[in-house]
Image (cartoon, rainbow, N blue to C red):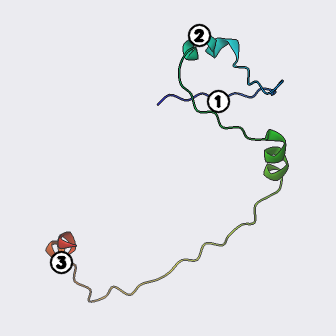
Amino acid sequence: MEAIEFTTILQNQTVILPPEYGSQWEGKSVRVLIIDDSQLRETSTEPRPKKPFQAISLNTKGFKFNREQANVR
């Protein structure tokens, strides 16, 4: 599957492809996804809350790894 991304302004319910893609995509069946950029810009300027990384510690003293048993799973 080949994909392109570009921005355009919807006019009279028509999506206009940039000229550099016109002949390449002419006559092909395509899927169109429309996203309102104005809403994306508003939310992207807000900083995301940081989630603290919580490390865990495991005591592996005395643990014996059995490769054959692990591969059976």
Crowding at label 2, few (<14), some or many (≥20) Cα neighbours within 10 Å?
A: few
Please, what is the three-letter code of the amino acid marked with disc 1? Glu
Q: Secondary structure at mark 2?
A: helix
Q: Which residue is mark 1?
A: 5
Left or right, 66 with reference to 14: left
Instruction: Locate residue 44, reporting x and y percent.
Output: 79, 50
Tally of numbered discs: 3
Residue under the image location 58 percent in, 33 percent down: 31
In the displayed structure, 73 sits above or below 32; it is: below
Q: If you read the primary sequence from the N terminus, does the residue marked by circle 2 or circle 1 appear first?
A: 1
Q: Which residue is mark 3?
A: 66
Residue under the image location 79 percent in, 27 percent down: 13
Tag 1 near tag 3, CB within 8 Å: no
Q: Nearer the viewer, mark 2 or mark 1?
A: 2
Q: Which residue is mark 2?
A: 23
Crowding at label 1, few (<14), some or many (≥20) Cα neighbours within 10 Å?
A: few
Tag 3 near tag 2, CB within 8 Å: no
Residue under the image location 38 percent in, 87 percent down: 59
Disc on res. 37: none
In the displayed structure, 3 sits above or below 18; it is: below
Picture quarter containing residue 18?
A: top right
Crowding at label 3, few (<14), some or many (≥20) Cα neighbours within 10 Å?
A: few
Task: Tell me how far mark 2 sits from mark 1, CA to CA.
Answer: 16 Å
Please, what is the three-letter code of the amino acid marked with disc 2? Ser
Task: Tell me how far mark 3 sits from mark 2, CA to CA.
Answer: 59 Å
Task: Tell me how far mark 1 sits from mark 3, CA to CA.
Answer: 49 Å
Q: Nearer the viewer, mark 1 or mark 3?
A: 1
